[in-house]
Image: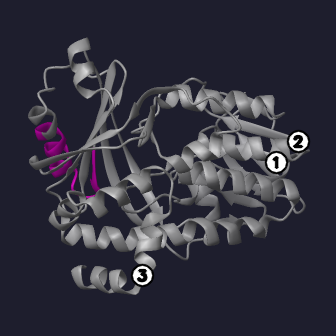
Amino acid sequence: MWDVAVVGGGPAGLSAAYAAARAGARTVVLEKATHPRYKTCGGGLIGTSLAAVRERIDVPADDRVDRATFTLDGRREITRSSGSPLLSMVRREAFDHALRKAAADAGAEVRERVTVRGLDDAGGHVVVRPSSGTPVAARAVIGADGSSGITSRHVGVAYAQVDLGLELELPIPPPVQERWRGRLLIDWGPIPGSYAWVFPKGDRLTVGVIAERGKGAATKAYLRRFVERLGLSGIEPVHDSGHLTRCRAADSPLRRGRVLVAGDAGGLLEPWTREGISFALRSGTYAGEAAAAGDLSRYESTVEAELGREMWAGRRLLAAYTSRPGMFHALLATPPGWRLFTRFCQGEPVLLDAVRRRPIRAALRAIS
């Protein structure tokens, strides 16, 4: 009998395992893959994420960005510089592997190549059924196996927003590396609510786009045009992948009995930027602490208080951005707009603080 069983070995699951094990709970992680493994992700860590892992790992950053270029569907280019890093760029295989080691060092047992097929409520505990091997019994289960995983379905997570992200990992020669070192690019896209990005990671560039699901052909065309515009279309990708990001409805459950869901499994991410790593790290930690303490309802109230407010602000910003992307682009060209972007990247809750102000809320409603 384990105190805590974690399904999924990404940032949310490994944060949950680390927190639970550090609190003295007998903890096991069940991960279907083997670390280190590739994961489709932009890999940009904002200050909130860095603060969440500061005591656990030395972040394996391939680059630290202090300059940002913004375009509006390829036009009206603006570039701004910051006196300190905006983002730390990581490859998820290295980042997740470091989190795995930290969880194991804290006392969690990490079992890989274990695919979970079902969960059974056994009264005072939950039985986790793998596709092969012995079932695992635990007093609490934390689901961190993604928005299409078994735990999300078990809890009944409902999603209000589903987006399609397409991404390329491009190996680049030294001259191109030098051109992009320390600089990111964000393009506000032609599809309502969409945007594209270029993130530098040493000898690679991560290039991607995201847009509302249901516009697959237009999203693929946007990525193709974006790559061509950057002069990168002749490079054969190391990885060419896609994924769906699902953002929970405001009233969606986060727990069913003794099963909690964290990170993507709970639909926890920022709706406008679709930034999810900081939400995974924080929600995983909240879940691990609550499970170790035997106070599972505390997890729900903590998520609503700490992350629900940020998601509320993000939904309002996304609605306004979808209607008027040009206005957001113009704002970034101003000193106040650039300061807001910088402070967001460095981990300050500026989006929430801004949307709380009554004049800004009224303006966002009018724009939307």
| Residue 149 in view here | no
Spatial CA span between label 2 and label 1: 6 Å
Look at the image and say whether residue 364 sits in the magenta stretch.
no
Segment tinted magenta in the rendering: 209-225
Please tell me which of labels 3 and 1 falls first in the chain: 1
Using the numbered discs, state the Cα–Cα distance from disc 3 to disc 1 in whole angstroms: 41 Å
Discs 2, 3 touching: Cβ within 8 Å: no
| Of the image marks 2 and 1, the number of the one nearer the N terminus | 1
Label 2 Cα crowd, 10 Å radius (few <14 / some 14-19 / many 20+): some
The residue under label 1 is 4
* Left or right side of 64 for 208: left
Residue 220 belongs to the span the image colors magenta: yes
Residue type at mark 2: give it: Arg
Q: Is residue 8 left or right of residue 165?
A: right
Provide the residue designation for mark 2.
26
Q: Is residue 200 left or right of residue 84?
A: left
Up-down relation of residue 205 to residue 304 (above or below): above
Q: Residue beneath label 3, please?
A: 357
Pointers 2 and 1 in contact (CB under 8 A)?
Answer: yes
In terms of secondary structure, where does tag 3 sit? loop
Query: Which part of the image, by quadrant, shows the C terminus?
Result: bottom left
Q: Amino acid under label 1?
A: Val
